[in-house]
Image (cartoon, rainbow, N blue to C red):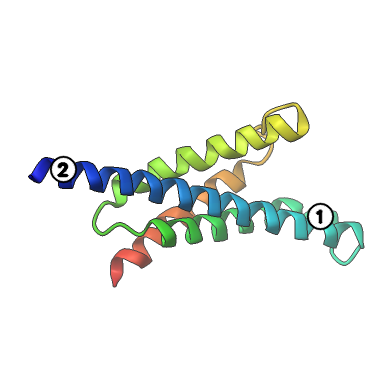
Amino acid sequence: MQKTNENGREKLDIKRIAVGGVLGVAVMCMMCLMMACLVIFKLIPSELTTVYAAFSGLIAGFLAMAVVGAKGKILVYVPTVFVFMSALIFLIGELLFNRPFSFASNPYMIIALFFGLSLGSAVVNRR
């Protein structure tokens, strides 16, 4: 009886990771789209694009882990969701721009995404 409960929990955990990752990437894309609109209408300078992309990664990672929110499994879920979200970003770049997102072009966004995931997981597990 215990194995069926574990198998059921694993499927739920995969769904959590997928939903959290997709939500995080969607938030990141929307925030970057807002930044692009602000730059186009010249409300903010284009030099702040890297900073805003890093900020969007931080917020997206925080929200993704707020959705995943597993108790006591920070070391399992943070890298898993990070890899899933990085793969989604890579695929979106490949599908939309016919070239993958280069992690060397903006390493701050990826670093901020990891810190956002860690922060979100720590906050959710604190309660």
**Which residue in the structure is indicated by mark 2?**
4
Question: Is residue 68 among what the camera can see?
Answer: yes
Quadrant hosting residue 38: bottom right
The residue positioned 91% from the left and 62% from the top of the image is 42
Question: Is residue 114 among what the camera can see?
Answer: no
Residue ranking furthest to the left:
1
Secondary structure under tag 1 reads helix
Q: Please indicate whether residue 82 sits to the left or right of residue 35 in the image.
A: left
Residue ranking furthest to the right:
41
Q: How many marks?
A: 2
Q: Please indicate whether residue 80 sits to the left or right of residue 104 in the image.
A: left
Amino acid under disc 2? Thr
Coordinates of residue 31 in the picture (x, y in percent): 69, 59
Residue ranking furthest to the bottom:
127
- How many neighbours does mark 2 have within 10 angstroms: few (below 14), some (14-19), or many (20 or more)? few
Amino acid under disc 1? Ala
Secondary structure under tag 2 reads helix
The label shown at residue 36 is: 1
The residue positioned 27% from the left and 43% from the top of the image is 10
Task: Work out which quarter of the rendered image holds the C terminus and state it.
Answer: bottom left
The residue positioned 61% from the left and 39% from the top of the image is 89
Coordinates of residue 16 in the picture (x, y in percent): 39, 51
Q: How many angstroms separate mark 1 from mark 2 (CA)?
A: 48 Å
Whether pointer 1 and pointer 2 mark residues with C-beta atoms closer than 8 Å, the reply is no
The residue positioned 48% from the left and 39% from the top of the image is 84
Coordinates of residue 70 in the picture (x, y in percent): 30, 57
Coordinates of residue 32 in the picture (x, y in percent): 72, 54
Sequence order check: which comes first, mark 1 or mark 2? 2
Task: Work out which quarter of the rendered image holds the N terminus and state it.
Answer: top left
